Image (tube, rainbow, N blue to C red):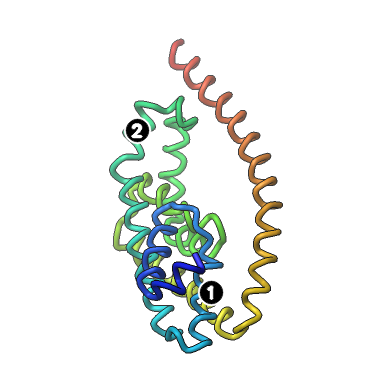
């Protein structure tokens, strides 16, 4: 990512933020922080970095929303047991987003990891595209501004800090694997219960 940003500048920034918001797990902390660092050296402009990052994330989030909106529910209804989601899960998700849609998307956009995938459940819940876009824009604007300015203010120290991100990443991956394993076992049980109930 750092090589891409160094070589392609603003274009790489837009592509990386777009991909991350479209549910590709790219660490935006590194992308935006390094872009901020490049701005501190004069190679980029920090205001342009923030604006383009927000635009990239907004456009990418519409892709995730579309996946959930136009493919999510039908896919789960047809292949629910394979994706370990039940119809009752989707019903709860839709009700939750109808009541708390904007806050969920807004806060999801300023939380690491969650921010990458929050668009899909919003689409599945059929959240209005205008409401989704507004909440995404506000949350992304706060996140992109904060991380880019941190990279800008830290300057050359940024490269040292990213090494800490790498070490922490291994710990987070180990925790994530354990959580995912527990989740998968729980979902297998839930899908089996719903399938058994449908037979009776």
**In the displayed structure, does residue 124 sit left or right of residue 116?**
left
* SS assignment at label 2: helix
Q: Nearer the viewer, residue 125 or 70?
A: 70
Contact (Cβ within 8 Å) of mark 1 with mark 2: no
Badge 2: residue crowd in 10 Å (few <14, some 14–19, many ≥20) = few
Q: Position of residue 5 (x, y in %)?
A: 45, 71
Quadrant in the rendering for residue 130 = bottom left
Closer to the eye: label 1 or 2 = 1
- Residue shown at the point (39%, 68%) measured from the top left: 12
Taking depth in this image into account, of 131 and 157 the one nearest to the observer is 157
Relative vertical location of residue 141 with respect to residue 68 in this rendering, above or below: below
Q: Is residue 75 visible to us here?
A: yes
- Specify whether 15 is left or right of 117: left
Viewer-closest of 95 and 187: 187
Q: What residue do we see at 37% from left, 44% from top?
A: 124
Give how far across and how far down residue 85 sits, in percent.
Answer: 47, 32
Label 1 vs 2, first from the N-terminus: 1
Q: Is residue 106 left or right of residue 58?
A: right
Residue 163, quarter of picture: bottom right
Q: Position of residue 153 (x, y in %)?
A: 59, 86
Q: According to the image, label 2 marks what residue?
A: 75
Disc 1 secondary structure class: helix
Q: Of the numbered discs in the image, which one, if any, rests on residue 135?
A: none
Residue 83 spot, x, y in % from top left:
46, 31
Instruction: Quickly name the residue at label 1.
Output: 34
């Amino acid at each position: 990512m750092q090589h891409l940003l160094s070589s392609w500048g603003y274009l790489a920034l837009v592509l990386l933020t777009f991909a991350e918001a479209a549910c590709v797990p790219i660490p935006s902390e590194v992308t935006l922080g390094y872009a901020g660092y490049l701005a501190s050296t004069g190679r980029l402009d920090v205001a342009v970095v923030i604006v383009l990052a927000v635009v990239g994330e907004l456009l990418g989030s519409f892709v995730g929303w579309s996946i959930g909106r136009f493919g999510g529910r039908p896919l789960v209804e047809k292949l629910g047991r394979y994706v370990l989601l039940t119809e009752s899960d989707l019903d709860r998700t839709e009700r939750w987003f109808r009541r708390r849609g904007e806050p969920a998307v807004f806060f999801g956009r300023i939380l690491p990891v969650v921010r990458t995938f929050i668009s899909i459940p919003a689409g599945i819940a059929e959240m209005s595209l205008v409401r989704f876009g507004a909440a995404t824009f506000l949350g992304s604007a706060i996140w992109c501004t904060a991380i880019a300015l941190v990279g800008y203010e830290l300057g050359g120290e940024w490269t040292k800090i990213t090494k800490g991100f790498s070490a922490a990443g291994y710990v987070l991956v180990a925790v994530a694997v354990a959580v995912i394993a527990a989740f998968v076992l729980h979902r297998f049980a839930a899908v089996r219960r719903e399938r058994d109930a449908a037979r009776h």
